[in-house]
Image (cartoon, grey):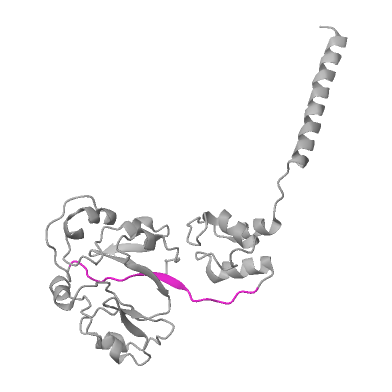
Amino acid sequence: MSVTGIIIAAALVGGTGLLIGLFLGFAGKKFAVEVDEKEVAVREALPGNNCGGCGYAGCDGLAKAIAAGEAPANACPVGGEAVGKIIADIMGETVTAGKKMVAFVHCSGDCEKTTNNYEYDGVHDCGMMQFVPSGGPKSCHDGCTGYGSCAKACPFDAIRIVNGVAKVDKDVCKACKKCIAACPKHLISLVPYEAASHIACATREKGKVVMNACKVGCITCKKCEKNCPEQAITIENNNPVIDYDKCTNCGKCKEDCPRGCII
């Protein structure tokens, strides 16, 4: 190949490269997607667990919602107050500190306090209990089955199965609500971290049935409701409920409960 041919080939290749570069540069500007700087900053401030506890599809979804003003700055349950303040500064807002919430399992009927109707030898999954006789081997049909669907769903390893009942480590829990969604018996709810008294029973059965099934089951004697000095306990659907906004953590309900189902 002559020198002239080499020069011509190099010129063609260089020219083609230049044209392609110019085209890509034009296309990049023409079809560029505008980036919301606040959204980017908010996303960087979020912890990145993508747990969905905020109600959005991961941290990207929450960042977009906060930047658009569709979600509050402190919407991330994992980041808590600290992350909420950082995001509030980014958004030019002020946030008021809310109560720290944690998950609580409303059952204390462990293997020593409950009885079994039969021996179960099958899949250890709480959701499967609806397909077995009486909703599981335990005599209490409303209690924790102890097969750990909530523990498997928890992305923070905050739940352990202790002697047949799920227990939440409130110092590890991030209130993401994954366990609440995973429990087929709806035994888990969010309660204030600072609260000292909780109803550890969710049965709706009458007294005699409960006494035959569990040593610590609520028999709806109503002593907690009658004796609470703050009127913070009411009986709803045959089971006591604590109004944590009224509760002062005096412990009177625990002292008066003859069954020990307030812990």
Give percent across and percent down for residue 186.
33, 65
User: Where's residue 77, x and y in %?
Assistant: 50, 66
Residue 43 falls left or right of residue 109: right
Q: Is residue 225 above or below residue 113?
A: below
Identify the image quadrant of the C terminus. bottom left
Residue 24 appears in which quarter of the rendering?
Answer: top right
Which residue is pictured at 24% across the width and 61% down the height?
Answer: 145
Q: Residue at x 52, y 76 (%)?
A: 98
Which region shows up in magenta? Answer: 94-111
The answer to whether one can see residue 186 in this image is: yes
How far across and how far down the image is residue 109, in percent? 22, 70
Q: Quadrant of residue 74?
A: bottom right
Q: What x and y, as percent, mark residue 78?
A: 50, 64
57 to the left or right of 129: right
Location of the N terminus (image quadrant) = top right
**Residue 146 lies within the magenta run:** no
Residue furthest top in the image: 1
Q: Is residue 170 visible?
A: no
In magenta stretch: residue 99: yes
**Residue in view at x 27 percent, y 73 percent:** 201
Q: Residue furthest front?
A: 237
